[in-house]
Amino acid sequence: MVDSVDAALAQAATAAERGADLVEFRVDRMPDPARVAELVTRSPLPCILTCRPTWEGGEYAGEDGPRLDVFAAALAQPRPPAYLDVELVAYERDEAFADRIHAMLHASPDTGLILSSHDFKTRPPDLLQRGDAMRQATACRVIKLAWRARSLRDNLEAMELPGMFAQPTIALCMGEFGLPSRVLAGKCGAFLTFAGLDDQTVTAPGQVGVATLKSLYRWDKVGPQTSVYGVVGWPVGHSLSPHLHNAGFDATGYDGVYLPMPVPPEYEHFKATLSAWLDEPGLRFQGASVTVPHKENLLRFVREMGGEVEPLAARIGAANTLTVRGDGKPYASNTDYAAALHAVCDAMGITPDGLTGRRVAVIGAGGAARAVVAAFATHGASVVIYNRTLEKAEQLAALCEGLPGKVVAAGMGHLCKSCCEVFINCTPIGMHPNVDETPIPDWPKVTDRTVVFDTIYNPLQTRLLREARAAGCTVISGVEMFTRQAAAQFEQWTGQPAPRELFERVVREKLAGG
Ligand code: NAP
């Protein structure tokens, strides 16, 4: 978005340094022929020139006449813009306007016309007709269709559109659901994707910065054969999983990309989105991490689709991993279970067999607690579940009947700090931003044989862990479980060992504000 020639040129130079191939100058706020001519002439990158009117979501409030003068001045330069972006509506409604555009393009054959259409509210009902009108416009060199996605499913249409027209096509979804269309544009044969200079200075909702697109979302590596993965949850905007898995794909040379996948809580949304993504053959959607509130939905979905559920995930009643198997069938499994188990056993210097008869206190009875309780009871530990809502603890204990270890339920008030060897926090108490809270205050002095594991990983050191360490306990951070469950997912999907040290470094850097 151009405010002055010098500032815009400096930004274009930065964009070039960060790996952009082309820069779009939005001159909505500076519709001045002489200054725009200077801007395009001195641009360090080939450019798209756009002066977007307010009625199409831009900031230019003037008439079309002065806008045409700006275009004419720019296209008359010895180094004219590579592309001129003109809205389909303006081009179609006024023959004189279209004629002037044609005349300019005729005199400046190095400039191509992008005909564009934007809907900032929804998918327009006449989206395909708009594309068709652009296709038929003789001067149109590139088709651009952008609309606000209503769900992740809209991205699929954006990915199909480039294959439908003879002209190079840009098809992008805006808004929180639209990121896949931006990241996967190259995979689907789209002409280009847009990025902001950084994540903060973007010009459309849902856009990311060029560095994020290139380094986090692997823009230069994503191609037609790239497998797509994601984290399905609501919300997922702050998930660290894309940072881990994309770094892992990079480090191992695996041809994959991993995206945040926001899906609203209801099962119908989950089913509709995942079915559509799995059915899109060109997408190569191969798996997902599934988080709150969809862990139970994943089990139901995979059963309904005729896929297989890992017996353990079926018993726990929650899965966190979707893997598409070689025959195309979905498989649901739970990697939290083994992650929690091995994090604790490694800290205790024992194998899971050594848990027989040990006393373990689990605080909480939600999704994380289910995996943790089942893991320890399966290996013979005696587990007490302490939960705010006693009934939920009792339900979880009942689920574990028949496992080798005894599982009993108790109210939070009965938590006893000396009667267990292992304490595991499976509640959000102490999680950012409520970092001054702890589920277990006032630790007595204990031996280092007492192990305290907080499944929370943000912050890295919770109050629970700080105080337990000061009292002499061995402590384990939730990062251990987080990176282990992610590593198990990575291995299921790629068939390669996961770079767990890298995962740990990435999580620690991100949480430290890197
Ligand atoms: P969940 O299904 O919503 O369960 C939350 C549990 O915490 C419930 O038992 C709930 O008790 C209890 N709880 C919530 N707020 C409480 C409060 N203020 N006081 C007392 N009890 C409270 O959540 P979840 O998926 O199990 O996740 C729980 C925690 O595990 C999260 O903090 C998350 O960070 C962590 N986690 C970590 C990993 C990892 O990889 N490190 C993976 C999964 C989860 P009620 O039953 O009474 O509501």
Image (cartoon, grey):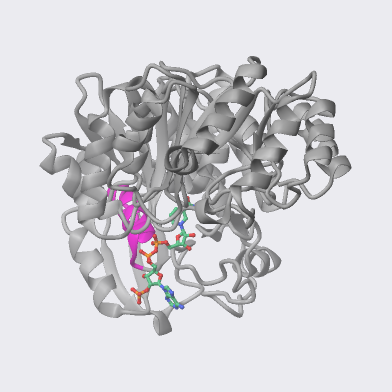
The residue located at (51%, 27%) in the rendering is: 498
Residue 286: % across, % down: 33, 28
Q: Is residue 270 above or below residue 427?
A: above
Q: Which residues are magenta?
A: 365-382
Observer-nearest of 142 and 90: 90
- Residue 164 visible: yes
Observer-nearest of 95 and 454: 95
The residue located at (50%, 47%) in the rendering is: 481
Q: Is residue 121 left or right of residue 474?
A: left
Residue 187 found in image quarter? top left
Residue 264 found in image quarter? bottom left
Residue 6 found in image quarter? top right
Query: Is residue 378 a member of the stretch shown in magenta?
Result: yes
Q: Is residue 51 above or below residue 15?
A: below
Residue 364: % across, % down: 39, 69
Residue furthest to the right: 6
Q: Main secondary structure of the magenta part?
A: helix
Query: Is residue 254 a member of the stretch shown in magenta?
Result: no
Q: Is residue 183 above or below residue 263?
A: above
- Residue 185 visible: no
Q: Is residue 257 left or right of residue 503?
A: left
The residue located at (32%, 35%) in the rendering is: 157
